[in-house]
């Protein structure tokens, strides 16, 4: 399949690119500052990205920002960041992808475990992730041309915990997280939120 | 208790006011165009509302708009409406309420059944409702001064179905929906999403 991965240079995205290539797919890498350049916060940037690629079978997104900080310190701007980047950035990507995917193609977005399992500091991120899961479940009911839409909800990623100077032992390796994206692309799931802990090899 | 109800003139809000008064609470009615006037889309309007009221025990919100239309007809502006009105309007209300509630007071917001049970047409509304539920679950972990935050997720309301010219038989009467708000205000729940079908009298 011909697959575009947005956020291809990120901790998860990089491993998703590797895993899809290992499964013999043709991968187009997109990111803010390398490969095909795209900024999900800007709708025109999303359309410009799709105008450069033809005959896509799958769109995978591992990009989008949101704030993570104590509830009483979160500002209105922190909430707006998550709404415009991780939430509406991916919603806009999905809406645009519909016009550019081959019949039966798929869209796979990224949420995160705090959608359903919040922790202190996650008020904005939980809102964004849960909202995206609500969108995916609903949009799946109305996708045209047998297109599919799903989301992967990564738990804490081992490499990220290391970067943050935290104990990495509860984390899942990014390469294992990536297997859930491969499953979403290659499977026939519709409107599903994947927990990568069920897909690690 | 002294309770402000925002959206007090709405189908659900009106019955919530009645139910709270029937339980001998002091109710302050707020709405866009009557009682204490407030527009949840405007943060300054929320702060102006709270500046008019002292010693509140509970804030109940039955207000907020979002679009409901077929997925392929939803525009970016439709999504933005729900994000700024029903989602961030209620989040901004909750954040402001924290500075105005007595110790141990409560905040009760309104989501809706399509958060977890989407139907065709609900892509934007499901996103908004699910996002709000994610926010409530997470914010509940960090509420100061023993404040509580919960949400009520109404099913389809009988009166609304009648207004829409649809079969009202699967709907729950607004007066029954209102009992879940009374339970949220009077109980000790924290971070809970109430299904009114479990609380109708």
Image (spheres, coloured by chain):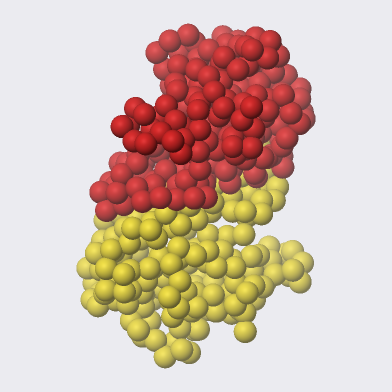
Chain colours: A red, B yellow
* Residue beneath the point at 70% across and 70% down: B171
Name the side, left or right, on which B183 lies relative to B104: right
List x then y, in percent, for residue B75: 56, 37
Image quadrant of residue B139?
bottom left
* Residue beneath the point at 56% across and 20% down: A16
List x then y, in percent, for residue B60: 42, 70
Name the side, left or right, on which B99 lies relative to A1: left
Quarter occupied by the C terminus of chain A: top right
Q: Nearer the viewer, residue A174 or B9?
A: A174
Name the side, left or right, on which A11 lies relative to B116: left
* Residue beneath the point at 50% across and 17% down: A14
On screen, residue A136 above or below B138: above
Quarter occupied by the N terminus of chain A: top right
* Residue beneath the point at 54% across and 75% down: B180
On screen, residue B105 above or below A76: below
List x then y, in percent, for residue A139: 65, 40
Image quadrant of residue A54?
top right
Q: Is residue A120 visible?
A: yes
Q: Is residue A108 visible?
A: no
On screen, residue A187 above or below B67: above
Tally of marks:
0
On screen, residue A83 above or below A34: below
List x then y, in percent, for residue B126: 59, 50
Q: Nearer the viewer, residue B25 or A155?
A: A155
Farthest residue toward the front? A169
């Amino acid at each position: 399949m011909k697959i575009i991965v947005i956020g291809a240079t990120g901790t998860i995205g990089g491993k998703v690119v590797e895993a899809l290539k290992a499964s013999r797919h043709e991968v187009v890498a997109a990111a803010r500052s390398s490969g095909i350049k795209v900024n999900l916060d800007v709708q025109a940037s999303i359309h410009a990205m799709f105008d450069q690629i033809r005959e896509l079978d799958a769109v995978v997104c591992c990009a989008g920002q949101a704030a993570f900080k104590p509830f009483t310190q979160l500002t209105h701007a922190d909430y707006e960041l998550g709404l415009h980047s991780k939430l509406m950035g991916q919603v806009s990507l999905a809406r645009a992808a519909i016009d550019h995917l081959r019949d039966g193609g798929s869209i796979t977005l990224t949420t995160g475990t705090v959608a359903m399992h919040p922790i202190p500091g996650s008020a904005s991120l939980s809102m964004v992730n849960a909202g995206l899961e609500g969108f995916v479940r609903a949009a799946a009911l109305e996708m045209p041309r047998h297109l599919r839409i799903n989301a992967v909800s990564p738990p804490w990623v081992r490499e990220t915990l290391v970067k943050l100077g935290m104990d990495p032992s509860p984390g899942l390796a990014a390469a294992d997280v990536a297997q859930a994206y491969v499953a979403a692309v290659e499977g026939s799931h519709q409107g599903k939120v994947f927990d990568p802990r069920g897909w690690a090899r």
